[in-house]
Image (cartoon, coloured by chain):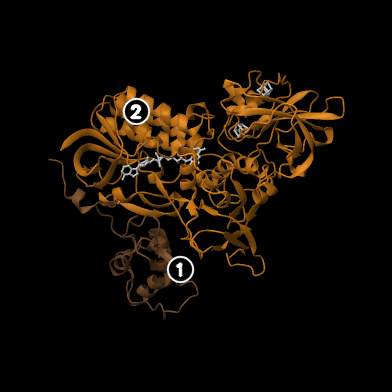
Amino acid sequence: MNTVIDRSKDIGEFIPQPDDDMLICRCEEITKGEIRKAVHDGMWTLTEIRRYLRTGMGLCQGQTCSRLVKGIVARELGVSPAELEPATSRSPMRPVEMKVFGKEEA
Amino acid sequence: MKRYEVIIVGAGPSGLSAAIEAAKKGLKVVVFDENEKPGGQLFKQIHKFFGSKEHHAKIRGFKIGEELLQEADALGVEVILNATVVGLYSDKEVNVKIGDQIHHYKGDTVIIATGASENMVTFPGWTLPGVIGAGAAQTMMNLHGIQPGKKILMLGSGNVGLVVSFQLLQAGCEVVAIVDALPRVGGYGVHASKVARCGVPFYLSHTIKAVEGKDKVTGVVIHQIDERFMPIAGTEKHFDVDTVCMAVGLSPMSQLLKMAGCEMEDNPKRGGQVPIVNEYGETSVSGIYAAGDVSGIEEASSAMIEGKMAGVCVAEYLGYIEKEERDAELKIFEKDLDSLRQGMFAPKNRGKKIEKTDEGIDISTNLLEKGYVADDEIERFPGVTHKAGVHPVIECTQNIPCNPCQDACPKKCISTGDNITYLPFVKEDAECINCGMCVASCSGQAIFLVDEDCGDGTATVTLPYEFLPLPQEGDKGYGLSRKGEKVCEATVVSVKSVKAFDHTNLLTMRVPKEYAMKARFFKKAEV
Ligand SMILES: Cc1cc2nc3c(=O)[nH]c(=O)nc-3n(C[C@H](O)[C@H](O)[C@H](O)COP(=O)(O)OP(=O)(O)OC[C@H]3O[C@@H](n4cnc5c(N)ncnc54)[C@H](O)[C@@H]3O)c2cc1C
Ligand code: SF4
Ligand code: SF4
């Protein structure tokens, strides 16, 4: 797996596409165009995209969109999705309310 | 913090099988599942499973789940439901949300059997209410008894798309089309055929252009695509639907393993992000195992064997059994697994274009492109023979690991040869007594009993029937072709439902004798 992305690579200009307004991450309401733009803003890893746009940080925790986001970023960078390191997995892997997360059993 | 010898995450077929195996060896086991019901995917599967006896073939999925659960219970396995595992650490600490609290557990070993989640594809309108996953449709129908919609388009022709389409029909919904971007039906031909004969059209090399509607789905437009998946202008087709169902693959839910620091890989053959495991499911972190769909999308039958392997491995890991005992058991499981991973749909054949069966017979191309075997293709398969009197006609034309038909016949009329994936054939000296067991046992609903010439210009065809309301003796209607088109008039001679058939009813219809080999379904005339 390629974990280092060569940032000197020229990926060209951001070119608008007709379906840029399509929602990809429905929990955080992020569109395909926003994700593509973020790549051109220099967010080349899925972790960066996630911190920049909050994709996959909503209610479903990326269950629906992480594969889609990965595909879009890979296409924009001209690499295969398998080459992209997935975003870090952290506890809690399902959304948990703070009051529950903080309430540990004695 | 509570300690267990084995903590299993996921009470699906793999998790429960692992629990049973470990408990048999005397280990103290707990299984957590976030659902309110145990069984994982199995609890939604109302169809009869493929495979052999050892793999619970011809038993309906939810029954297999119940059997596993009973066995686990009897062995003293603790199954904790409504318990979401939210964290796993490399020292095998497991954080579980139960109620409004986080509980900490420590496992000497951990088996992750969390299964998979559904993939989605995007098109304009994909976020509209009414666009749902096939799994969601299945949950609504089979667990909650709710129709997901009235008129439905299915995207995806893999086994999930085909099985759920059939279940939608059973639930009384109309399935307007099954659409797939690939040029060939992805799932088993027998699953496709039972949907096709109900009249559902297949559109291969097609995809959704857009879903229409303002606040909910009101229609859908599909279009044809070329080999490079680019749309072909002018091929648009519109359907009025209220629901679009997506069955476009599953992705392993492997986040917990990644979180624990297990080495991972992106492996498209296994369905996405999976842990790197040895042949028995051990990950790179000693004592953490993965089993079932989470380590590669397959089937419940293979998930159960993988679970057993992990269960035996943890028993040895903790010193409950010797290495020799473990290896002897693993050898048997490996052989089992290998027998399942054969045939034209085996993981190793994924993406390969198969043109001939193992027997050297040309595959039905119509089956791959339209979902049913054409009249001029059916005769070349070994299960299709002719004889005076009632005899079985087996329309099972692809090499799949399945053989309940062979075991079902009390007269030993049917054989799948030496290999479970061979095509079933009717033995030459077969003396069929018209008992119907083969028809009811066939997981693919691919066996018919035909009397081609009753002497009065008619023939009778007995077919598996799993719809309500059941037609009655004397009902008049039509014989439908394999494509689901009305081809002749038909009268119901009898409808048999006995316990041994396990809810598959046997409907016998009388048709003009020219249609003995053409009519494969019955539709009652509307009055
Ligand atoms: C429509 C359809 C038809 C099918 N037909 C067949 C068939 O005919 N024959 C066949 O062999 N297979 C069939 N399969 C495939 C089969 O159902 C799956 O391969 C099998 O269920 C995988 O088993 P599993 O134990 O790995 O995962 P699952 O059955 O998915 O179980 C995983 C369990 O883990 C739980 N879980 C996940 N994450 C957590 C967490 N963080 N905390 C707590 N619990 C968690 C889930 O709630 C779930 O209960 C079918 C599948 C579908 C969808
Ligand atoms: S009807 Fe009975 S006897 Fe005849 S082939 Fe089927 S199982 Fe055998
Ligand atoms: S004919 Fe036999 S092998 Fe084919 S699907 Fe039916 S039971 Fe399985």
Q: Residues within 10 Å of mark 2 (few under 14, many from 20)?
A: many
Q: Are marks 1 and 2 in contact (CB under 8 Å)?
A: no
Split into quadrants, the picture shows ligand 1 in the one at top left
At a point 64% along the width and 70% down the height, the residue shown is B233
Question: Percent x, y for residue A1?
Answer: 36, 60
Residue extending farthest left: A106
Query: Are the residues flagged by discs 1 and 2 from a single subunit?
Result: no
Amino acid, disc 1: Met
Confirm if mark 1 falls within 8 A of ligand 1. no
At a point 57% along the width and 21% down the height, the residue shown is B499
Check the picture and name the quadrant holding the C terminus of chain B: top right
* SS for dot 1: loop
Give chain B's shade: orange
Amino acid, disc 2: Ile
Question: Percent x, y for residue B225?
Answer: 61, 64
* Picture layout, residue B400 above or below residue B323: below
**What's the chain of the residue with tag 2?**
B
**Letter of the chain shown brown in the rendering:** A
Distance between the alpha carbons at the discs numbered 1 and 2: 47 Å
Q: How many marks?
A: 2
**What's the chain of the residue with tag 1?**
A
Question: Percent x, y for residue B481?
Answer: 74, 41
Question: Percent x, y for residue B259?
Answer: 26, 51
- B316 left or right, relative to A20: left
- Residue that numbered label 2 is attached to: B20
- Residue that numbered label 1 is attached to: A22
* Picture layout, residue B254 above or below residue B77: below
| Eye-nearest disc, 1 or 2 | 1
Q: Quadrant of residue B33?
A: top left
